[in-house]
Image (spheres, rainbow, N blue to C red):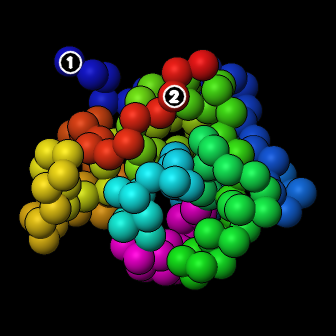
Amino acid sequence: MIAPLLLLAASSLSLRTVTGTTERLYPTNDRKATVVFVVLAECPIARKFSPEIARIARDYGRRGVRFVMAFADGTPASIKAQMKSFELPFPAAKADAGLIKLLKAATVPTAAIVAPSGKLPYVGRIDDRFPTLGVQRKPRRADLRIALDQFLAGKPVSPARTEVIGCGLPTP
């Protein structure tokens, strides 16, 4: 069984964005949570989630949630182009091996809710539109939205971890 709240190991965690700014994931006091999306630029499944990622960012950004896209591949120029192409209006960074290890991400797209304290109340899929590789359907469960609603309401997030169906991350 996975603990309902995982704690990031470092005392703080920041990502250097492709525009040169630093995004602090925690500790933070100015937002209710940060959602990190770990993706591969060349993953067709991750690309298919881009419109839903934009909608989630719009809907929950209004509620005090910050968003960061962490690319496990790509150059700063290609990452900027992809963010612009999919109209994703939030910071993007290169995901380093440390972040991927902390999140225990093996497949993309992986979404993680980072609490201001550094706890990880949720790590997993965005929704269940891909029940298995190669099969896409209309989503039946909006896992990330459900987790965000539970977290923002001060309730335990259940489940705290879901299986991600997508492209495998290369092992370092």
Residue 27 at least partly seen: no
Structural crowding at the residue carrying mark 2, measured as other residues with C-alpha within 10 Å and reported as few (<14), some (14–19) or many (≥20): few
Q: Amino acid at mark 1?
A: Met
Structural crowding at the residue carrying mark 1, measured as other residues with C-alpha within 10 Å and reported as few (<14), some (14–19) or many (≥20): few
Of residue 27 and residue 125, the one placed in the foreground of this image is 125
As displayed, is residue 101 above or below residue 85? above
Disc 2: which residue: 170
Q: Residue at 16% across / 62% down in the picture?
A: 136
Locate residue 80: give its quadrant: bottom right
Locate residue 82: give its quadrant: bottom right
Is residue 102 located in the magenta-colored stretch of the structure? Answer: no
Q: Amino acid at mark 2?
A: Pro
User: Magenta residues?
Assistant: 51-67
Of residue 10 and residue 40, the one placed in the foreground of this image is 40
Which quadrant is the C terminus positioned in? top right
Q: Residue at 31% across / 30% down in the picture?
A: 4
Locate residue 9: give its quadrant: top right
Disc 1: which residue: 1
- Name the spot of residue 151 as percent of width and height, x first: 36, 53
Q: Residue at 71% across / 46% down in the picture?
A: 94
